[in-house]
């Protein structure tokens, strides 16, 4: 058991890198201090739970998959889409298998199962989690645009095109028609 715990502690430190690693696509758009991968994954998990609930799925499962959907980037980094055109990265399932080697089987199966289900889009919850990933990117692009970054329309367009659930599409349209701070005015006005 001690070896398993040591491996698990190492995995936790490795996943902690996601708090420091930045989403590199935003650098291409001119964002000097973009969100971290962990920040993206947190909001994607929140969105995944919401979409899954409204689509009739299990919100906890969708949120759970979202928490692990980019953990492979501790090893392969966040390769921007333009870079993926020239690079052949290992599959997320293969990276995850390497990451969970040496941790308790129950944990390895849990993480590998979540990643495999997400990548295969083999459940409603996986589809909702994938939509959440795209919707989070769209929302982040809108926020960056409101902060003065004008080179984000491509992220908005590609994210919008990739969303497949009706709830995800409706949320995307609402996000595009709502100012990022409109909620503050509603709160202050007692709405």
Image (cartoon, rainbow, N blue to C red):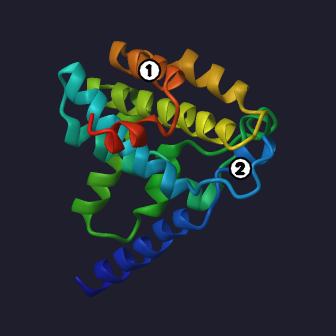
Query: Picture coordinates of residue 34 (x, y %)?
Result: 66, 53
For marks 1 and 2, give the one nearer the viewer. Answer: 1
The image's mark for residue 156 is none
Residue at 47% from the left image edge and 66% from the top image edge: 15
Picture layout, residue 19 above or below residue 55: below
Picture layout, residue 108 above or below residue 5: above
Q: In which quarter of the image is the C terminus?
A: top left
57 and 12: which one is in front?
57
115 and 165: which one is in front?
165
Q: Please tell me which of labels 1 and 2 falls first in the chain.
A: 2
Using a 10 Å C-alpha cutoff, classify the residue at mark 1 as few (fewer than 14 neighbours), some (14 to 19) or many (20 or more): few
103 and 55: which one is in front?
55
Query: Picture coordinates of residue 62 (x, y %)?
Result: 29, 37
Q: Residue furthest bottom?
A: 2
Q: In this view, does 155 lie to the left or right of 71?
A: right
Q: Does the image show residue 153?
A: yes
Q: In this view, does 16 lie to the left or right of 54?
A: right
**Tag 1 and tag 2, C-beta contact below 8 Å:** no
Q: Quadrant of the N terminus?
A: bottom left
Using a 10 Å C-alpha cutoff, classify the residue at mark 2 as few (fewer than 14 neighbours), some (14 to 19) or many (20 or more): some
185 and 3: which one is in front?
185
SS type, badge 1: helix
Residue at image mark 1 = 174
The image's mark for residue 24 is 2
Query: Picture coordinates of residue 185 (x, y %)?
Result: 41, 39
Q: Is residue 122 left or right of residue 120?
A: left
Query: Picture coordinates of residue 75 (x, y %)?
Result: 60, 60
Residue at 60% from the left image edge and 54% from the top image edge: 35
Residue at 42% from the left image edge and 33% from the top image edge: 132
Q: Is residue 115 left or right of residue 86?
A: left
């Amino acid at each position: 058991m001690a070896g398993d715990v040591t491996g698990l502690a190492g995995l936790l430190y490795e996943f902690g890198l996601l708090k420091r690693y930045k989403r590199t696509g935003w650098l291409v758009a001119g964002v000097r201090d973009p969100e971290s991968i962990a920040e993206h994954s947190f909001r994607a998990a929140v969105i995944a739970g919401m979409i899954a609930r409204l689509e009739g799925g299990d919100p906890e499962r969708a949120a759970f998959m979202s928490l692990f959907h980019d953990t492979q980037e501790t090893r392969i980094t966040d390769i921007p889409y333009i870079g993926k055109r020239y690079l052949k990265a290992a599959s997320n399932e293969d990276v995850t298998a390497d990451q969970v080697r040496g941790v308790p089987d129950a944990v390895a199966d849990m993480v590998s199962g979540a990643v495999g289900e997400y990548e295969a889009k083999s459940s409603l919850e996986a589809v909702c989690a994938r939509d959440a990933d795209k919707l989070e990117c769209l929302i982040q692009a809108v926020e960056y645009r409101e902060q003065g970054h004008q080179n984000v329309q491509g992220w908005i367009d590609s994210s919008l095109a990739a969303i497949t659930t009706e709830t995800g599409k409706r949320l995307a349209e609402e996000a595009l028609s709502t100012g990022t701070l409109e909620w503050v005015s509603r709160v202050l006005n007692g709405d």
